Image (tube, rainbow, N blue to C red):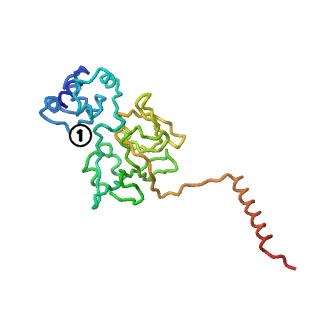
């Protein structure tokens, strides 16, 4: 099935096996083996094919593309065959504790760079530090990510965000902070707005106005995690206007004077 689908996709692009293999960093013999059914592509290469042909993994693996409608082909050709409901093969590797409960894996700063390729690799996930927070719901999947930069105050550089895995991207609440794992940018923490009906994308916005909003196509996103809380060694700073501080002092002085008049007896 996969081999026949790859062959059909390639022919619709009017490309040779050598051209496809070269663009995807494969040898011609390896790619030819996939098309002819001699070998099965691993997950990494399946993701490459899905991204290159703008087709969901679900269709690539499970569907006979020779039998799909022209309407579906039109979406694929336009690059809008996007699985936002989580119905396709969306792989998440996880670890469990001795009682078979899901751990919260902590993506360290060192592991951050490799997360976009290792997020679905059980070996990569298995070496991450783990912990548990008893106040979180047990029927949800959580992971902790390092935050880099100052685009999302009050969450500061060096903080860690604990987030809940989002399977159905249609459930993303506009304006709510999420961890978005993208192919090009890796792990980013932004307020997210759905633009799925318009152009199959999400708009990512910072709380720091110095950073401009930008859009990411859904096909370029590998995972979305909803913000739950964050861990930081920094105390958020609180600033007061000078006029407000002056008024607060005057009010305090008035209160103290009032207390003296009420509770301190007058001497004869």
Nearer to the camera, 201 or 140: 140
Give how far across and how far down residue 184 sits, in percent. Answer: 36, 37
Quadrant of the rendering where the N terminus is positioned:
top left
Location of residue 107 with respect to 210 vertically, above or below: below
Q: Is residue 85 left or right of residue 46?
A: right
Q: Is residue 253 left or right of residue 170?
A: right
Q: Is residue 263 left or right of residue 205?
A: right
SS class, disc 1? helix
Give how far across and how far down residue 233 sits, in percent. Answer: 47, 58
Location of residue 123 with respect to 218 vertically, above or below: below
Residue farthest to the right, as pictured: 268
Give how far across and how far down residue 249 sits, in percent. Answer: 72, 60
Residue farthest to the bottom, as pictured: 268
Residue at x 23% of width, y 40% of height = 43
Identify residue for label 1: 43
Residue at x 50% of width, y 57% of height = 234
Location of residue 251 with respect to 15 vertically, above or below: below
Q: Residues within 10 Å of mark 1 (few under 14, many from 20)?
A: few
Quadrant of the rendering where the C terminus is positioned:
bottom right
Quadrant of the image occupied by residue 251: bottom right
Give how far across and how far down residue 106 sits, in percent. Answer: 36, 54
């Amino acid at each position: 099935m996969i081999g026949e689908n790859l062959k059909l996709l390639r022919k619709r692009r009017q490309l040779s096996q050598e051209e496809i293999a070269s663009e995807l960093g494969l040898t011609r013999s390896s790619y030819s083996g996939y098309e002819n059914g001699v070998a099965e592509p691993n997950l990494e290469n399946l993701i490459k094919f899905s991204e290159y042909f703008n087709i969901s993994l679900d269709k690539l693996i499970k569907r006979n593309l020779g039998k799909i409608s022209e309407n579906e082909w039109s979406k694929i050709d336009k690059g809008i065959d996007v699985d936002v409901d989580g119905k396709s093969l969306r792989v998440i590797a996880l670890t469990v504790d001795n009682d078979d409960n899901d751990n919260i894996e902590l993506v360290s700063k060192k592991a951050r760079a490799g997360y976009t390729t290792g997020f679905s690799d059980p070996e990569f996930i298995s070496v991450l530090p783990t912990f548990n927070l008893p106040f979180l719901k047990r029927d949800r999947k959580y992971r902790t990510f390092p935050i880099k930069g100052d685009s999302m105050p009050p969450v500061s550089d060096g903080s860690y965000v604990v987030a809940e895995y989002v399977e159905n991207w249609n459930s993303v609440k506009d304006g709510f902070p999420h961890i978005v794992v993208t192919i090009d940018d890796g792990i980013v923490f932004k307020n997210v707005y759905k633009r799925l009906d318009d152009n199959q994308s999400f708009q990512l916005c910072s709380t720091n106005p110095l950073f401009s909003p930008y859009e990411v196509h859904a096909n370029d996103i590998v995972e979305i995690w909803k913000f739950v809380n964050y861990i930081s060694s920094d105390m958020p700073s609180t600033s007061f206007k000078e006029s407000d501080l002056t008024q607060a002092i005057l009010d305090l002085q008035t209160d103290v004077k009032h207390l003296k008049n009420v509770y301190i007896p007058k001497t004869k």
